[in-house]
C-alpha cells in the first residue's frame, strides 16, 4: 500500500512539474512570437498593428523574461514616433498599451515599476494636451496633467496580506486533504481518527485562512 501511495505521489509531482514546464514554454514561445510580429510590423510602418503585438508580448510575462524590456522599449519608440507625426491619439494608445500590458502581468508583491510610472506621466501629459472637459476649462495644461496623474495613481489591486492568506490557505487546505486521504483511512476504508486529527485540523485552518484572505484581498 505504501508503494502505491509513493507511486501516486511521484506521478502527481511529475504532472505538476510537467504542467509548470508547459506553461513556461508557452509563455516563452508566445512572447517571442508576438515580439517578432511587432518588430516586423514596425519595420513596415504599420505602427498600430505593432502596438497590438507589443502589448501581447508584454502580457506573456514570466520571471526573468528577456522580451519584456524589448516590448516596452518598442512601445516607447512608437509613441515618440507617432507624437512627432502629430498623432497624439496613436501615441496615447502606445503608452496605454505599455501601461496595460505591464499591469496585466503584475504579481502580488511587485515593486514600483519605472516603466509604469513613466507611462502614467506620458498619458497624463498627452491627455492634458488634448484638453479637458468643460468643468476643467479653468485649469491650465500643467494643472490638468497633474489632475490626470492623480487619477492614474489610484489603483485597485489585491491587498498583499490578504492575497498571501488566500494562497497559503488554499495550498494548506488542498495539501491537508491529500494527507487526510493517504493517512486517515485504512486499506478497508475505515476512518482513523488518531491519524486524521492533524490533517483535519490543518484543512480547517487552511479553509479559514482562504476565506479570510478572500475577504481581505
Image (tube, rainbow, N blue to C red):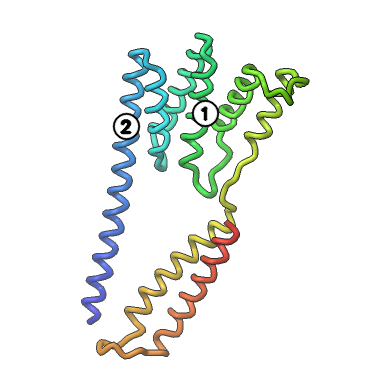
The residue lying at 48 percent from left, 36 percent from top is: 102
Residue ID for mark 2: 32
Which mark is nearer the camera, 1 or 2? 1
> Could you tell me residue 4's position as x and y percent?
21, 76
- Between discs 1 and 2, the one toward the N terminus: 2
* Residue 43 on image: x %, y %: 34, 14
Q: Residue furthest right?
A: 138
Alpha-carbon neighbours of circle 2 within 10 Å: few (<14), some, or many (≥20)? Answer: some
Q: Quadrant of the N terminus?
A: bottom left
Q: Secondary structure at mark 1?
A: helix
Residue 80's spot in the image, x, y percent? Answer: 51, 15
Q: Residue at x 39, y 37 (%)?
A: 65
**In the visual, does 146 lie left or right of 211?**
right
Vertical side of 125 occupied by 9: above or below: below
Q: Quadrant of the C terminus?
A: bottom right
Instruction: Check disc 1 and report the residue beneath it.
Output: 96
Viewer-side residue, 17 vs 49: 49
Q: Quadrant of residue 42?
A: top left
With respect to residue 212, does 70 lie above or below?
A: above
Q: Are marks 1 and 2 in contact (CB under 8 Å)?
A: no
- For residue 55, side relative to residue 135 (left or right): left
Q: Position of residue 47 (x, y in %)?
A: 40, 17
Q: Residue at x 59, y 53 (%)?
A: 159
**CA separation, marks 1 and 2?**
21 Å
Amino acid at each position: 500500500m505504501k508503494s502505491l501511495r509513493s507511486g501516486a505521489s511521484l506521478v502527481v509531482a511529475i504532472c505538476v512539474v510537467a504542467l509548470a514546464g508547459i506553461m513556461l514554454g508557452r509563455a516563452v514561445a508566445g512572447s517571442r512570437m508576438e515580439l517578432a510580429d511587432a518588430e516586423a510590423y514596425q519595420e513596415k510602418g504599420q505602427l498600430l498593428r505593432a502596438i497590438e503585438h507589443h502589448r501581447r508580448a508584454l502580457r506573456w510575462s514570466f520571471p526573468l523574461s528577456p522580451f519584456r524590456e524589448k516590448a516596452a522599449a518598442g512601445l516607447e519608440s512608437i509613441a515618440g514616433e507617432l507624437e512627432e507625426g502629430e498623432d497624439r491619439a496613436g501615441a496615447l494608445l502606445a503608452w496605454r498599451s505599455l501601461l496595460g500590458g505591464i499591469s496585466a502581468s503584475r504579481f502580488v508583491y511587485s515593486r514600483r515599476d519605472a516603466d509604469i510610472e513613466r507611462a502614467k506621466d506620458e498619458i497624463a501629459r498627452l491627455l492634458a494636451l488634448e484638453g479637458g472637459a468643460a468643468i476643467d476649462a479653468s485649469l491650465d495644461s500643467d494643472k490638468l496633467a497633474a489632475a490626470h496623474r492623480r487619477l492614474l495613481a489610484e489603483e485597485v489591486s489585491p491587498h498583499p496580506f490578504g492575497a498571501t492568506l488566500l494562497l497559503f490557505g488554499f495550498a494548506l487546505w488542498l495539501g491537508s486533504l491529500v494527507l487526510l486521504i493517504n493517512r486517515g483511512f485504512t486499506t478497508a476504508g475505515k476512518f482513523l481518527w488518531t491519524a486524521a486529527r492533524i490533517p483535519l485540523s490543518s484543512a480547517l485552518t487552511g479553509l479559514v485562512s482562504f476565506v479570510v484572505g478572500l475577504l481581505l484581498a
